[in-house]
Image (cartoon, rainbow, N blue to C red):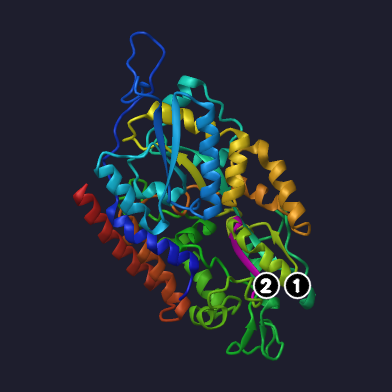
Amino acid sequence: MKSKALLILSLLLIAVMLLTTGCGGSKSPATTTEESSPSEGSEATSNGPVKITIFVGFGTGTEPEQIELHNQIAKEFNESHDDIQIEFITVPYEEHTTKFSTMLAGDMAPDIVMPIGVMGTAEFQDEWLDLKPYVERDNYDMSDFYGPALDLQYVKGKLIGLPLGVYPSAVYYNEDMFDAAGVPYPPHEFGTPDWTYDKLVEIAQKLTLDANGHDATSPDFDAEHIVQWGWDGWDWIPFRMVPSKFGGDSIGMSADYRTAEMNSKPWVDALQFVSDSVWKWHIRPSAEEIDAVLGDMDALESGMVAMWEIHSWMSYNYDTWSEAFNWDVAAIPAGPDGSIVDETNIDGVVIPSHSKHPDQAWEVVKWLMQPEVMERLTDSYGCIPARKSLAENWLSKMSEAYPNVDFQVFLDGIEYMDNPNYEAWVPAYGEVFDATEHAMELVLTGENTDVKAILDALNEEVQGYLDEYWAEH
């Protein structure tokens, strides 16, 4: 099955085998009292200003125009500071884990890593400096950050970073297909009564057409010759996310991470929904159909899918869509228990605990987090600024570029952000990811649609990984 997002995730997860654990040092910020000592490397020396290196490569930020922006920002910072100078180090995404591990091993840790998402921080779970002492020392105001985005920066009681930008999800839909079918558009307000996944299925069946023009509700519908699907589900999003829609969470383990719970009812309900969407309701293409029909195109770009639930980082293809059809975005539906979960990616800024200049790195982080700097960075990265005060500007710019799209939906979705996030750390991260993806792939390919049997086998497999992990830790 071809999936751009899963290919990207797989590249990262190959590298997760190099996961660094137990390497986090314990450092506290220098205080202003006479009795205190500055943290390691915190003093500017007579040799000149302290150089702070900023590692880029855990996600976006590596495109030529983004590198140019980073260089411009470095120039502006360096010209306005005598005691600190900054330098960006850009590494191709596929090399970032090896490069970062090598720098740590060689005692050459960078001082800042950005932008970095939840999966990126999970790769080196114990490497990030706790920023709470810095926040408390400086009485740093964090009230302007979106609360749910800030919450995701807390790991094991530590504030491992500050949020830079967010990528919430929405239900993208092709208005032209709705108009042709005479079906009302899905609601844009979160919490709209009756806007559930059951309702989504009902709508999607009316938008799923066979070669003779019969929709999936018709007794004459030919499921062997579908030419338009009503929904492409959560394609490009790992299966770990889906159980959170059905009353569970994306961890699938006990609170202490020692017992697998991936055959629990929410996980069974989630995978059953995926199976039914393909093989019972026929609203979602199978793995074979995705390969044969959609190919390398995204769901909406193919012109053969009416709805797709995916993140705001699809902005890179908005122009392509707009040239081909009219489109808009709707709110995320409620799950069976009434809860609404908006799967969200996030980019943040972290300081490695092995930085030799944590105090100066913190000063740079605060400078980068200024609204005017954050706005330039997030514009380049294609994300929504993590500061609430920048929402109006972001909304204005997006609405001007695409006046027929309701971008307020994304801003509203931030309040429903998934936590725990579906990219959050679990023991044996790479093995667990591969195992859960394989379980869903069995269903999407039709190789096995006995959902309970699949998840019982998955749970047993993951329990083995957990036992091995804890035996070594």
Residue 262 appears in the picture as rendered = no
Secondary structure of residue under mark 1: helix
Secondary structure of residue under mark 2: loop
Name the one closer to the observer, 253 or 427: 427
Q: What residue is at 32 percent from the left and 58 percent from the top?
A: 15
Q: What residue is at 77 percent from the left and 77 percent from the top?
A: 181
Q: Mark 2 points at which residue?
A: 306
Residue density around tag 2, few if under 14, some if 14–19, many if 20 or more, within 10 Å? many
The verdict on residue 118 being magenta is: no
Which residues fall within the magenta stretch?
305-312
**Which label is found at residue 15?**
none
Give x and y (percent) for residue 111: 38, 36
Left or right of 208: which side holds 418? left
Height in image: 207 above or below 186? below
Give x and y (percent) for residue 13: 36, 59
Hey, what amino acid is under mark 2? Answer: Ala
Give x and y (percent) for residue 163: 52, 40
Q: Is the magenta stretch mostly helix, strand or loop?
A: strand
